[in-house]
Amino acid sequence: MKKIILGIAILTAIFVGCSSVQTTEPTIANSNVLSSLTAATGIINSILDTATVGSTVVVPAGIYDESVILRNGVNLDLTGVVISYSGGGPAITDNGAPATCAVIGNAIILNPTLYIYDIYGNVVNCYDGAAVDIFSSNSDITLTCDSIIGDMRGVDTYGDLNLVATSVVGKKDCAVEIRPYAHAIITANLTAKGDSGYFGCNSGVGGVAIYAVNNNDTVTVNGDVVAYWDYTAKAGINSTIMINGSLSYFGPRTPTSGNVIISGATINLSIEDQPGNSDGHRNKFKK
């Protein structure tokens, strides 16, 4: 398998949530220089654009503010990489074009919410998608990483997905949402933290840790599943969710909806167990 090495000297310190500019041009394995690149937000995608089917693009360790668009037949090695996209969209996506590929490594994948304010400083809209968003029903993605943290959803997929991670978190909505007719195996601990109505952000489910939407299949979750606001697991029509792990939920809600099979313990969480949001705002159940 051909490997394309993305060689970048990071001259400016990059921190999650901060903008930065990389001035060093990336190169690929044969030392051809892509001389038009200067901004951190286009580096990985520009290299992916040059890769041929069967190649693996190896990204150097570092933090990137970019929405990475997967390419059909091109694999991606994100060992030591943090992708934190601040532009109001997914950090990793197929952008609606069918893609069959693998993403490997121990990446941390984030998408802080982009809020839209009126002239009075009130939130009127925000990006309510996922940190990883697979839009094409013809995509087939294998994704191995350390963790995925979505300010709204963690993962949302219309395509087939084999996900291996330590954890997936949806801060204000689903940790993982599997759309109709998609097939998925999820090996990760899943957490849905809060209220989908926060700060004027609207979404349809409201904090289900794993949601299989009428996909006529069994979605397997190998890991523990926690939700602090809505159902912990919700299976739509003709869907089954198999959880090989424990399920924890907040008492006022029922733990599951639909055909959900749990191999481990079911734990009813108390108010004291429920965390505040990471931005310092408390959940509505907190006193």
Image (cartoon, rainbow, N blue to C red):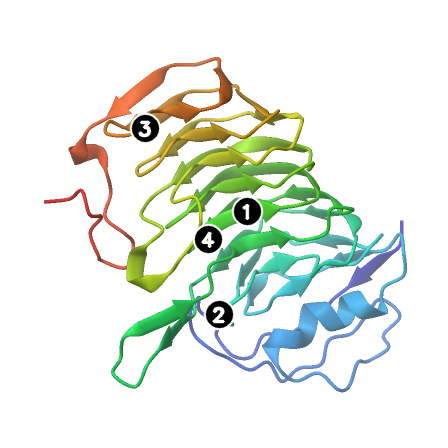
Separation (CA) of disc 4 from disc 1? 8 Å
Which residue is disc 2 drawn over?
Answer: 86
Residue in the foreground of this view, choosing between 133 and 145: 133
> Mark 2 or mark 1, which has the lower sequence index?
2
The amino acid marked with disc number 2 is Ser
The amino acid marked with disc number 1 is Val
Which residue is disc 1 drawn over?
Answer: 155
The amino acid marked with disc number 4 is Gly
The amino acid marked with disc number 3 is Tyr
- Is residue 210 at least partly visible in the picture? yes
In the image, residue 162 above or below residue 96: above
Which residue is disc 4 drawn over?
Answer: 150
Separation (CA) of disc 3 from disc 1? 20 Å
> Mark 4 or mark 1, which has the lower sequence index?
4
Which circle marks residue 249 in the picture?
A: 3
> Mark 4 or mark 2, which has the lower sequence index?
2
Residue in the foreground of this view, choosing between 143 and 32: 143
Q: Position of residue 25 (x, y in %)?
A: 71, 81
Query: In the rendered structure, are the residues bearing label 4 and label 1 in contact, judged by CB atoms less than 8 Å apart?
Result: yes
- Is residue 9 at least partly visible in the picture? no
Closer to us: mark 4 or mark 3? Answer: 3
Residue in the foreground of this view, choosing between 59 and 153: 153
> Mark 4 or mark 3, which has the lower sequence index?
4
